[in-house]
Image (cartoon, helix red, strand yellow):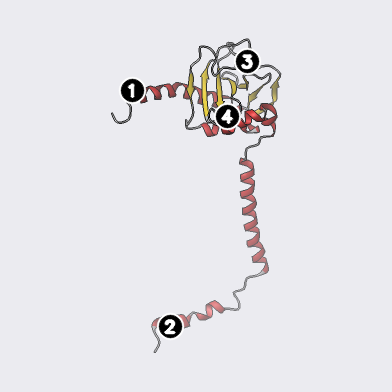
């Protein structure tokens, strides 16, 4: 005795063994081409988004690059005072630090500083960035690793008006490309205005109250 299911199975059994339903060599090649195209596209996308460090390593030096990558503490110093000699202190005299560690957006800032494509390489000048202090509106970023001490502290100065950037104790400067020339100063200004307010609110309203 057969069940209705058996009848349905028998009725359509020839559909799966139809000699006309063949996979041609051309179909296999097309399918393989689609797969390879997808793999190549994914690889190209990864390559395009990969941080390029060739020119930035030459400009900043390997220790500063390491500071950008690994710094456990990042501080922002608003309008550091001009000094006759490069600073070896944590802060320029009279400046108050803004602690950025853990601030949203720092990952993008690190990537920007590291990537060759963030800079206008034809603009490099043999002129120390500290000469701009007091002349234009500047901020300084300080990257440090106080516990592990994997690299020396690194200080870089950013000209907020024209987008020039360079090491505080260095003798060269470069301009950010047009895309980041306004975006970076805007981000740093926003952070400088917001973070002290956030700290004040946290101190005024401690958890549990």
Marked residue nearer the N-terminal end (3 or 2):
2
Mark number for residue 149?
Answer: 4
In the picture as drawn, the residue positioned furthest to the left comes out as 209
**Looking at the image, do the residues carrying marks 3 and 2 touch, with CB atoms under 8 Å apart?**
no
Front in this rendered view, residue 73 or 175: 73
Estimate the x, y position of residue 156 in percent, counting from the top left.
Answer: 60, 22
Estimate the x, y position of residue 124 in percent, counting from the top left.
Answer: 69, 23
Question: Circle 3: is it few (<14), some (14-19), or many (20+) Cα within 10 Å?
Answer: some
The answer to which image quadrant residue 153 occupies is top right
Which quadrant of the figure contains the N terminus? bottom left
What distance separates the C-alpha of mark 4 from that of mark 1? 34 Å
Marked residue nearer the N-terminal end (2 or 1):
2
Question: Circle 2: is it few (<14), some (14-19), or many (20+) Cα within 10 Å?
Answer: few
Q: Secondary structure at mark 4?
A: loop
- Judge depth for marks 3 and 2 and give the one in front: 3
What distance separates the C-alpha of mark 3 from that of mark 4? 21 Å
**Residue under label 3:** 86
When the figure is inspected, residue 51 is found, relative to residue 12, above or below; the finding is above
């Amino acid at each position: 005795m057969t069940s209705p299911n058996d009848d349905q199975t028998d009725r359509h059994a020839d559909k799966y063994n139809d000699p006309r339903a063949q996979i041609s060599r051309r179909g296999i090649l097309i399918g393989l081409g689609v797969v390879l195209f997808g793999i190549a596209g994914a690889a190209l996308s990864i390559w395009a988004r990969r941080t390029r460090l060739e020119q930035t390593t030459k400009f900043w030096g390997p220790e500063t690059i390491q500071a950008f990558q690994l710094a456990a503490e990042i501080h922002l110093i608003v309008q550091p005072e001009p000094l006759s000699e490069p600073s070896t202190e944590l802060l320029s005299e009279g400046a108050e630090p803004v602690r950025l560690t853990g601030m949203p957006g720092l990952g993008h800032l690190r990537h920007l500083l590291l990537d060759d494509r963030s800079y206008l390489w034809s603009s490099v000048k043999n002129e120390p960035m500290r000469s701009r202090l007091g002349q234009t509106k500047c901020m300084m970023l300080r990257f440090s690793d106080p516990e592990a001490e994997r690299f020396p502290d690194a200080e870089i100065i950013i000209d907020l008006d024209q987008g020039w950037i360079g090491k505080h104790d260095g003798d060269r400067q470069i301009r950010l490309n047009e895309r980041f020339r306004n975006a970076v100063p805007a981000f740093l200004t926003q952070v400088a205005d917001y973070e002290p307010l956030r700290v004040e609110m946290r101190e005024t309203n401690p958890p549990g109250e």
